[in-house]
Image (tube, grey):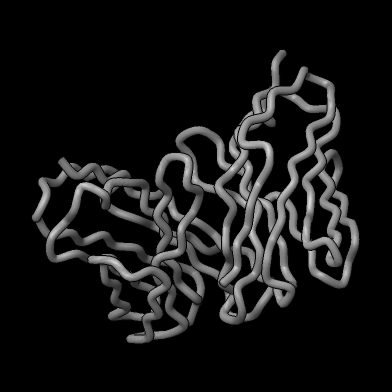
Amino acid sequence: GENVEQHPSTLSVQEGDSAVIKCTYSDSASNYFPWYKQELGKRPQLIIDIRSNVGEKKDQRIAVTLNKTAKHFSLHITETQPEDSAVYFCAASLGGNNRLAFGKGNQVVVIP
Amino acid sequence: SQTIHQWPATLVQPVGSPLSLECTVEGTSNPNLYWYRQAAGRGLQLLFYSVGIGQISSEVPQNLSASRPQDRQFILSSKKLLLSDSGFYLCAWSLGRSYNEQFFGPGTRLTVL
């Protein structure tokens, strides 16, 4: 089955700096890669996603890049703000029925 | 608009007791439904998913079971809870096609003592 790994497990950045989280996946058949953000005590919410036919996608301060050959994808957050502090989960599609395999999550701490 | 509800919000149960967690979705028809468990440091683990009434697929063998008695109702059950069942249980829904966002419910915090 699909195995999704995230690195690093915890990331601290100064406010205004950039943050990068990397994920690797094992199943070359995976073709959809979403990122979810979970603030403390709240439910995970989708922040950006990318399909396998695209190499990069941007949405304001957030971008995701995908390298299908190497089977890894990354989340980039620029000009970090305190409200970016959260746990970020990457995921990869698991066969059909819109199933996802999630990574263990990255704790991002933005230091004011 | 669509909304997803879970209850109870928190639950403390003794080892060996039964469990029933409920999830309901409003504002959509024939959604895919999912149960996840979130344990500390272990991310989101998919437990069950359902593509229709009475259709349940299990991802991880365990002492939990799921049922979908109605189109927008998903229930997670156990006959006898284990200590290792403690965690944060999240229900989610999505449209049935691929590449669709999964929308999570508020979750149930289960503590087994």
Q: A49 or A103, which lies in front? A: A103
User: Is residue A86 toward the left or the right of residue A55 in the image?
Assistant: left
Q: Residue at x 71, y 55 (%)?
A: A24
Q: Residue at x 57, y 57 (%)?
A: A102
When asked about the image quadrant of residue B54, the answer is bottom left
Q: Residue at x 62, y 39 (%)?
A: A106
Please count the marks in the image: 0
Q: B2 or A98, which lies in front? A: A98
When asked about the image quadrant of residue A76, the answer is top right
Check the image and report above or below for A38 versus B82.
above
Figure quadrant of the N terminus of chain A: bottom right
Check the image and report above or below for B54 versus B95.
below
Coordinates of residue A31 in the picture (x, y in percent): 74, 72
Coordinates of residue B99 in the picture (x, y in percent): 69, 72
Q: B108 or B41, which lies in front? A: B41
Figure quadrant of the C terminus of chain A: top right
Q: Residue at x 47, y 82 (%)?
A: B51
Coordinates of residue B88 in the picture (x, y in percent): 37, 47
User: Is residue A84 toward the left or the right of residue B23 in the image?
Assistant: right
Coordinates of residue A109 in the picture (x, y in percent): 65, 25
When asked about the image quadrant of residue A92, the answer is bottom right
Q: Which residue lies most toward the top here? A: A112
User: Is residue B62 toward the left or the right of residue A19 in the image?
Assistant: left
